Structure formats: structure tokens, C-alpha cells
Amino acid sequence: MKLRLSLLCILLSLSLVSSAQQPAAGNRPNIIFIMADDHGYQAISACGSRFIRTPNIDRIAREGALMQNAFVTNSICSPSRAVILTGKYSHVNGMMDNGTYFDGKQQTLPKIFRANGYQTAIVGKWHLFTTPTGFDYWNILPDQGHYYSPHFIKMGKDTIYKGYVTDIITDLAINWIDQHKNAPFFLMLHHKAPHRNAMPPLQYLDKFNDVKFPLPSSFYEDYTGKPALQRQSISVKNDLDIRYDSKIPCDSCPVTQINSWAPGEYQKELAGLSLEQRAVWDSAYEKEYEIFKTLKTKDEVTRWQYQRYLEDYLRCIMSVDDNVGRVLKYLDETGLAKNTIVVYTSDQGFYLGEHGLYDKRFMYEEAFRTPMMIRYPQAVRPGNRLKEFVLNLDLAPTLLDLAGLKVPADMQGESMKPLLMKQKVKDWRDEIYYHYYEKSFNLTAHYGIRTRRYALIHFYNPVDAWELYDLKKDPTEVKNVYNDPHYKDVIATLKIHLKALQEKYRDDMKK
């Protein structure tokens, strides 16, 4: 009798654990997917930032899980968004670069949620060039959008909102949730910030004025053995524009980059400011102009522009963090927090001066790696720190799995649910495949494999070159050791694994 009771207790316990891990059909979680644009992990304090404190974003990581090794499959805006929507690599979903139109007829994450009783919405930056599909409500920025009094396209109709874009996107998101909080909802809340040219909110124009940001150790890298880096045009030294990026009213300054398109684009950004706001803006940047006038050498200008670049970038992130806090506060006040999954991520990483670069695209760590964190009180234990390699490719299957929905067999990502619940996972990936296609900014198409120890990259169009980095000896990826004979066997093994990954993901490369 005692044995039967013991077995019954064990079975009951297993049943309770299983039910706790799997949401009931009538109690599926809400999902808020927050994505910034070009938010590097180096600018999040939960990820160890030396630049800034981000208490509200950090809260998601503290109360949930932080993916310490999250990467993207293609570090560029539109393709990354398509990967997240489809759970498929760029060559499969068709969105390989920023010049392509997304095929909205294909299976996407919001379509699956919508078919399973969810209310679906996207608010903010879309940047996929076609009309959003799978959403009950959409209110998006056209193309990149603007920071001040921006135009939106609301369900196909042009709309203008007064205010700062990050605040507006959050207002629209919270208003939509408030109307749909009694049914399960899936909301994609996509911020424009801190995308170039990083126009901060007026209340933060004086932040970081008294901070001197140290240059990254690789800032003055000479690109020896790196022909693809030698030809790029996304460097702080040569390619940040004095007007558009540094906000200096000077269209013919010496020792600075002047782009023909910059004055006009800068004026478009300022057009959303009222006369009173413009006066505040001009006053703040007039102070910067006075400092700029004292600079005499090209290197002085480069160092100064680096400071200016970081100041405005981080000011925009302060506003993103404020607005993440507004969303979390709303969830607390409405009682929605317990049954709502909150994701924070970026469409990819971003260079903050590493290798002398701004922007993204290359397979080097800072653009390849992306911030990613998930909070879900029902299933994710607070303070979980995932060391496993995860990808933006995994987000779609993970959210479906957490919601108790079947993950389509043709999705190429893996559900992170077992990792989030601290379960042992057999044969989780220990290497990553990356493929970047776009050649704007004098970039070179390339693909590669990343393991814990090594990064092997093949640049193939228009430059044909290989690079290998020993991440244990060279974590900043400065020294290309591809031609070092000591790594001959390592390279041979990595190429075998690289080919296997291309076959696994059906990327039919001929090189």
C-alpha cells in the first residue's frame, strides 16, 4: 500500500511539474517582443557595459534569462528582421540584404500566433518594404523613419504624431495592449533608436558632456592581412559625417568627411522640431561647435567625433531604457506581468569604435553578437545566465514553444525553452554559421563559422580572402592567423564543419 502511495505521489508531482511548464490552452502567455535598432551589447549594463547604466533593460535580464552568447545569422537590419519573423536563414526566407522586398506571403511568427487565437500587432520600425502581414494592427515607420514628429503608416494610412519617436512608439504599444489585454496578444514593439544618426531626446542633450570615453584597444588597427577591412567605408576616422553624425553646422570644414547628401538629410531630421525645440537643440550643439573650432589635426577631429558619436548614441539608449521601464511598469500595474513574456533584443550588434568602425555587417564579435534576454515568470527562473550559443534564428521557435504551440518543422532555429528552464539539453549547438551578402559601403560578402575557440571567415565578393582568429589568444580579433602553419589542421577541421553547416541549413555555396 505504501509503495502504491509513493508511486502515486511521484506521478502526481511529475504531472504538476509538467503542467507548470506548459501553459494551459486557455491561459496562454501574452508576448511583448521589444527590439531596438543597432543596440550593441556593449551599451547594456547587464552585459557588462563600460559606457552606460540601463536599469530597466537590466531588469528583464535580472528577473529572467540573459543570453550571454546570442548571435545573428546576418548582421544587417532588414535580413535580421526577416530571420526573426520566419525562423529561417536569409537564403531561405529570401531577404538577404536591405535592397530586397520581404515576401509577406510566407509563413511568419505573427501568422502562426494569429491562427491560434492571438491578437497580433506591430508598432514602430518595420523596414521590410512590403505591407506587414499576419497582424491585426500595424502602425509602422516608413523606411527608417525620423526621430522628431515622425510620419507613421497606420493600417495603410499616413499619420503624423507629435513628439519623440521612442516615446510615441511606446505610447502606441501601451494603448494597443490596453485594448487587448483580456485576450492573449503578441506585440512586436520595434524602436528606431539608436540607429544612425542617433538624434537624442531634448532632455538628454547634455548627458555625457563631462565623460571622456576611452578608445577601444583596436581603434587604430591597421588591417594587416584583412583586405575586406582595408576597403570598407564605415570607419570613424574617415566616414562619420561632420553634419549628419556630429551635428555640426559646417558644410565645408577642413579635415572632416562631408557627404553631399548629409546637409539635406540632416535638415529633414530637424524638420520635426518646433521653433522652441529647435532653439534648445541649436544651443546644445553650438557648444559642440565651439569645441570643434579648437581642433587642429585630423586625429584630434577623429577622437572628438568618436566622443560625439558615443554621446548621441548613448543618449538615445537612455530614452529606450526609459520606455522599456514604462512598459514594465504598465505590466505591473495591470497585473499582466506574471503571464507575459517580455523579450528585449536588437536587430544585430553594433561597433562602438572597435576595429575603428561604426555600423555592423562584419562577422567580428561586436556586430555578430546581439543583446538578448527573456523574462517569463511562469517558466523562466530569475537570474538565469545562458552560456550556450543561441541565435536570433531561435526566437520564433522559442516563443511558439513557450506559448504551447507546435513549432513548424521547416523552421531552422531551435527552441531555447529547455535552456530557459535550466534543463539539460543534449547536443545543443557548439558552433554557429553566419552569412552576410550586402556590398554597400564598400563591404564584401562573406560567410563563416564560429566556435568557442575560433572564428573562420571567408570573404568572397568582391574580395577573395580567408581570415582565422584564435579567440583564446586574440579575443579582439586583430591578428589574422589564417596563413600561420601552426593552424593548418585547425583550418582543415573548421572547413569540414563549415561545409556541414552549409549543408544543414541548405546554403548552397560553391566556394
Image: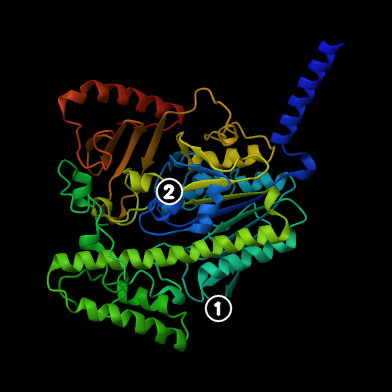
For badge 1, the amino acid type reads Lys
Please indicate whether residue 55 sits to the left or right of residue 431 in the image: right
For badge 2, the amino acid type reads Cys
Q: Is residue 154 visible?
A: no
**Which mark's residue is nearer the viewer, 2 or 1?**
2
- Quick check: 206 above or below 442? below
Of 166 and 319, the residue lying toward us = 319
Find residue 296 and report its horizontal and vertical position in percent: 12, 73
- Quick check: 93 above or below 257? above
Residue of label 1: 162
Mark 2 vs mark 1, CA separation in Å: 34 Å
Q: Quadrant of residue 237?
A: bottom left
Find residue 232 and report its horizontal and vertical position in percent: 24, 53
Name the residue at 69% across, 37% down.
Answer: 404
How crowded is the residue under tag 2: few (<14 C-alpha within 10 Å), some, or many (20+)?
Answer: some
Name which of mark 2 and mark 1 comes first in the sequence. 2
- Quick check: 48 above or below 398? below
How crowded is the residue under tag 1: few (<14 C-alpha within 10 Å), some, or many (20+)?
Answer: few
Please indicate whether residue 44 sits to the left or right of residue 110 in the image: left
Please indicate whether residue 427 sits to the left or right of residue 486 in the image: right
Name the residue at 19% across, 43% down.
Answer: 226
Name the residue at 24% across, 57% down.
Answer: 215
The N terminus: image quadrant: top right
Residue of label 2: 47
Query: Residue 326 shows which numbered tag?
Result: none
Q: Secondary structure at mark 1?
A: loop
